[in-house]
Image: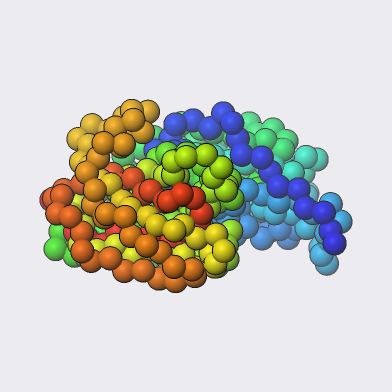
Amino acid sequence: MSQVIIAPISENAPAFTKQFTNLADHRIGSKVVAVSDDFFAKADRMLNHLPAEFYPDRYDDNGKWMDGWESRRRRNGGHDWSIVKLGVPGTVKGLQVDTSFFTGNFAPAVSIEVCYCEQELPADDVQWQALLPASALSADNSHFFEASSEQVVSHVKVNMFPDGGIARLRIFGLPKASHHGDETIDLIALVNGGRAVAHNDSHYGTPANLLAPGEGVNMGDGWETRRRREPGNDWCIIALGQPGSVDSVDVATSYFKGNYPDKMSIQAAYISDPNDLSLISQSMFWEELLPPQSLSADNNHHFAQLNSLGKISHIRINIFPDGGLSRVRLWGKVDQ
């Protein structure tokens, strides 16, 4: 079996990577709608939410298989580009361009432009706005750029100079709300701006997976903690995309059979001026939205008997004592 090497999580990631949603995440429908060249590696691969992988012995008909976007060696001047349609329009707060495992074939520089349009593919005469000027990249590295804009954007154009490869592209920002106040939505869904703020353990899977669209695809597509060998319980804190009131909660333990939590509960609060660093200590004293409930293996659970707390902005999910959840849905209405 071919060895696989997984890119490490960057330890110097700036705050915006935790504060905002990745609008370019393929799980919320982001896709490449046009590309100048992706001969060696398809451009859609750079939208994968998972860290890049490297298989030393994997080749395909065009050469070395790479986990990202890679164009041919350009011999006629110019530069390569791709256009990404974001899964949900939004305002951009920061960028990540990752060249993991691209060593002698990385893109030396990149620039990013944005626009807003209703069409799948922007027209040829669309007015692209510069978001990131041409900026140097280095081999096998993760690059972060402050690139805040109040313009709502739907498409991103990635220019790499002159050619080469990019492993991952992440566009962090705030999704534009497209729902009405009387509409019931999943208040913590990634597509609605929900985000994982903090957790005590994510040994096997991150809490951000709980907010992803659709059903979990396997046991790795969820939040799972290590086996707890000391008193207490595991927990994570989730920020709602927008404050709202909650009507019901869905919890899935899909694929978690011998390792699902025995019980779970949800605490909640409305924080008018949240500081992510202080939320952890505050959350221990939040009121219960959902009292402790028993869970079962590989199952979907619906809870409609909730304590009435009114408007909330954050929840704390407690699992007892440890284990794994696949998805959590917080159904309710945005507070206007």
- Kindly identify the residue that appears in the image at 49 percent across and 70 percent down: 298
On screen, residue 65 versus residue 134, left or right, reads right
Residue closest to the eye, 81 or 239 = 239
Looking at the image, residue 151 lies above or below residue 30: above
Q: Position of residue 127 (x, y in %)?
A: 40, 49
Q: Quadrant of residue 89?
A: bottom left
Q: Residue at x 86, y 56 (%)?
A: 57
Residue 224 is left or right of residue 296, and the answer is right
Query: How does the figure colour the protein chain or chains?
Result: rainbow
Q: Nearer the viewer, residue 102 or 312?
A: 312
How far across and how far down the image is residue 65, in percent? Answer: 78, 58
- Tell how many labels: 0
Compared with 249, 128 (above or below) is: above
Say which of 128 and 103 sits in front. 103
The answer to whether residue 96 shows anywhere in this view is yes
Residue at coordinates 82% horizontally, 54% vertically from top-left? 3
- In x, y percent, where is residue 187? 28, 56
Q: Is residue 23 above or below residue 61?
A: above
Identify the residue at horizontal 67%, vertical 53% (top origin): 68
Res 126 seen here: no
